[in-house]
Structures are given as structure tokens and as C-alpha cells.
Amino acid sequence: MVQSFDPSGAIETPEFIPARMLNEFSFCPRLCYLEWVEQEWRENEWTLDGTRQHRRVDKPGGALPDADKMDDPESETIHARSVTLSAPGAGFIAKLDLIEADDGEALPVEYKRGAVPDNEDQSWEPDRVQLAAQALVLRENGYRCSSGVIYYAQSRRRVTVPIDASLIERTNELARELRQTTERGAIPPPLVDSPKCPGCSLVGICLPDETNYALGLEPAAAEEETVRRLYPARDDASPLYAQEQGAYVGKSGEEVTVKKHGAVVAKIRLMELSHVCLFGSVQISTQAVQQLMKREIPVLYFSYGGWFNGLCSGMPHKNIELRRQQYRASETETALKIAQTLVRDKIQNTRTLLRRNSSVDVDAAMTELKQMEDRSLTANAFDSLLGIEGNAGRIYFQHFATMIKNKEGSAETPPFDFQSRNRRPPRDPVNALLSLAYSMLAKDLTLTLLTVGFDPYLGFYHQPRYGRPALALDLMEPFRPLIADSTVLTSINTGVVAPNDFIKAGDAVSLKPDARKRFIMAYERRMDALITHPVFNYRVSYRRVLEIQARLLARFLTGELQAPPTFTTR
């Protein structure tokens, strides 16, 4: 779909409405908006099954005769598959699964994966209006069409639908509403406690119950939950980290392979990959990159020491409207409002981490941090907010060493110690771990923001700088203590890394390769750990939380929510 830019903010509707979009709009206006205007799509088991059911009629076949030859008495019954026609007068375009032509009549046949509904019409309204739009397209192209057929694959039954005046009126009414909705440029509200949502492939993007909760609508929730969790708590796919220097990443069939000195050291199925991380001098083949881009699996490049250098991905997200709102908000007071929330959440989460893990009395520090937390919401300028965050960070890191419980060491390898935060390069083991953890978190949030449709390089709190994913750095603020710092402390206190796992070169300290593998595994375990969302009260992994927060921020920027999302733990 091509949309023209309108400085007023409205969106110009394309000339033709696809018949399939009328189906979606009748089923759920918000789903139609997400698919058509925001160009969102995600597969689930039902969409994949639908594709399988359609595979026969998705292949073009047969020939549809000209309309003026349909009355030829010698013409035979005709079956034409996967035919695309448009109707400028009606404003519809349709890809018809199957057209049967006989006795001068054209009969559109629409394939659906489900069973025949147990209702008076033995069909659903979305299917009927889609069929009616197809009939109007056929009529405008000169064909006679008085009825259509819906083939329900699960029941293996054909249901004939008369294309009468009432159905045409309803179809045109929905088309008008659809155009008005897209021209307003505002996403329709989500359905409330609808049974349609659990099977929708876009439910993780739509966030119907979360949005309704934030809007103050009361969902019908299970007893133990505030909001229904309508999608899996964890992702099925996971990242591949290739950090053996001299390793080579290639593709073999449906697998990605990692080789060292010609021998295969790892195989991962493409369908199980979320992204690929390459450290230092690891090579990757063009064939592997092309296949990964085709499947929207990004490739990320890190320095040998773990510095996040950049990424390679497929085509950018098509939701330009979100990026347009992001650019506008970055130059208004909205940016300060978002930054205040992020800094407040970060300070509160550092207080929580200190309170839970410090081995000494930190009451005074907690009091100071609480003052900083309160002041962050009243800061009237970015300079003031930066000062508040800087003071809070100083207090927090002054007490960071009190959370380190593993004090074992030797004369050759002194125990873990922490005096202050330093970087570029980190000059002690704890700072080396913190820097790597922050780099990993920035990487994950950059990928999340790209998935949602943001420009990760334009932030609201962090100012733009060449090559810096400022928005990713913004959103990681509340999660630094919860994910990165927590991974560092857990790794040290449980012995995942030991003082002799580090290399010192000049002032720089870095992890040895084997220790880095263990630390990355600890980070991934933290990302996959299930927590209770503090707002929605359901169990979900940190990896999912990052996406939820990014999508809620998008809803705030596009005007659907009145406040930026917040995430704090107790």
C-alpha cells in the first residue's frame, strides 16, 4: 500500500480497498488498521494453517474468459484460480481464490480454513462482505454475479451466499467506515474482553487487554490475574552467539552452521533463531546473510571485547506513521515527560536492588535516592534531570560493592572489588562485566525497537550522536539494575565468573573467552526469567517485557494512551 504524506497528520486512503481488508474490518477494526495502515503482520498456527488450506487456490491457473463471451452456448464450465481484479467505481480490489463460470454467470469461491458456523446464515459476516466485494468487482468488470460460495475447509462444505441488496448495502457501509477510520489516522480502540483476541496473530502487537487496562476500562479477568496474558510468556526463538575467533557461520538447508578449521561445531535450525551475534573476527557467508534477512533475523556485530558496533537487518519496518510521531515528540515537551518517567523508574529500581541485596545498612542511601526519585518528576529541563540522575548514580555505585558477596581471591588474583563506575575501557573486572551487560541490553533493545517500528537512533532523553542508538539507551534505563546489574551480581555471587577469568592489558580489563560464554548464558537466563509484570500482574519474561514496554510507548506517542509506560519492581 502506498500512502501519501499529509502535513496535517491525516492519512490518505489508497484508491482501492482490498476485499480482504473489508473482512478484517468487519471482524475487528483495530486488526484491519494494524494490518493495512501500520503494515503489521505476524504468523501463528491459525494463519499458517490458513496458508496451507489456501495453497491450491493460491497458484494461478485456468483462464477467465472476457465478460462478453460468457454467454457463448458452447463455452464449458471454467475454473480460474488466484485472479486479481479491481473496480474503480466501487473502490475495491480483490484477489479471488477461485472463479467458477458457467451458464453466463461468474461465481466467486472464497476458501476459509474453519468449519461452517452454527448460525442462521451458516457463514460469518466478515466472509460474506468479502464475497460481496468480490461480486461487485466482477460485476463492474462486466460479469453477471448473483451469488458466491464460501468453502469451509474444516467441514469440507460449500455455503452459497446470495449477493442481495442488503448485503451490498452492508458492504458499502463498512467500506465507508473503513475509509473514515484510516483518514482519521487514529487506531480504533481494542475489543473489550473479546473471545476473538486469543486466536488473533497480532494480539502481541495490539495488546488489547493491556491497552484497555491503561485506558481505565475494566477487563473481565481471571481470578488470579488482573489482565489476560494472551500470548506466550517466552519467545520460542533464541539468539546465536558466535565468538570463537576464526569461526565461520554458513547455511546448510534449513540450518545455520558454525565451523572452526573446517569442522562443524554447532548447528541451529533457522526457525529457532531470533538473531545472530558475531564477535570479533567471526565470518559469515553471503548465503547465510541473505537467508537471515529474508526471514527477518538480524545479524549483529560486536568487537572482540563485546562493544556493540552495529547490525545488518532486512527491509525496515513499514510503520512510517510511528516514526513520524517519534520525530515530532522528540522536539516537544513530550520528550521531557518520557525522560522524567524513565529516570524515575531507573532510580526506583536501583533502590529496590540495593534494598534486596546490600549486606550493610543502606538506609541513608535509600533516603537520598528516594529524594532523587521524587525530584526527577518535577525537573523542568533536561540539564536538571541529568544532574538528578548523575547524583542518583553516584550514590548507587558508592554502595554497589555492598551487594558483592563472593569475596574469594588469592595473591595472584585479588577478590572482586568495586570502587566506582569506569568504562572505555573498563579498568577492573566488575566494570568489565557491567560494560558487557549494558552492551548486551542495548543490543536487545535496539532489536526490539526495530521490531516495533521505531528509529532506535533518535531518543528522548539521550541526545542524538553518530552511531548511538539513543532510544535504546533511553528505554534501557529502568532495566539497567533489573537485568544488567542483576546479571553481574548473580554471576559474581554464584561463581559463574571468578577473579581469574579476566585478562588485563594496560589499563583495560576484559573477560577470557570461556568466561564470556558463561556470562552471556547467565544474561540470557536473566532475559528468559519469568517475572510478574508490576502493572498487568501476569507472568512474563524480561525479553517479552521489553517488547511490551516499547509497544506501549508507541501507543503513547500515537495518542492512544495518556501517559508513558512505567516499569518498577518492589
Image: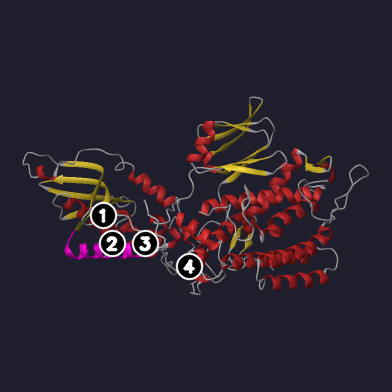
Crowding near the residue tagged with mark 3, few <14, some 14–19, many ≥20 C-alpha atoms within 10 Å: many
The residue pinned by badge 1 equals: 92
The residue pinned by badge 4 equals: 560
The residue pinned by badge 2 equals: 175
Q: Quadrant of residue 537?
A: bottom right
Q: Amino acid at mark 4?
A: Glu
Q: Residue shown at 67%/48% (left/top)? A: 440
Counting the numbered discs, the total is: 4
Label 2 – label 4 distance at C-alpha: 23 Å
Label 1 – label 4 distance at C-alpha: 29 Å
Residues at badges 1 and 3 in contact (C-beta under 8 Å)? no
Q: How is the image coloured?
A: secondary structure
Secondary structure type for disc 4: loop
Question: Earlier along the polypeptide chain: callout 2 or callout 4?
Answer: 2
Q: Which residues are magenta?
A: 163-183
The residue pinned by badge 3 equals: 182
Instruction: Locate residue 564, reporting x and y percent.
Output: 57, 67
The answer to whether one can see residue 438 in this image is yes
Q: Is residue 435 left or right of residue 177?
A: right
Q: Amino acid at mark 1?
A: Phe
Q: Quadrant of residue 400?
A: bottom right
Q: Quadrant of the C terminus?
A: bottom right
Q: Residue shown at 60%/56% (left/top)? A: 471
Residue 172 falls within the magenta-colored stretch: yes
Pick out the residue farthest to the right: 411
Question: From what the image shows, is residue 14 above or below residue 215?
Answer: above
Q: Is residue 469 left or right of residue 95?
A: right
Label 3 – label 2 distance at C-alpha: 11 Å
Label 1 – label 2 distance at C-alpha: 9 Å
Q: Amino acid at mark 2?
A: Ala
Label 1 – label 3 distance at C-alpha: 15 Å
Residues at badges 1 and 2 in contact (C-beta under 8 Å)? yes
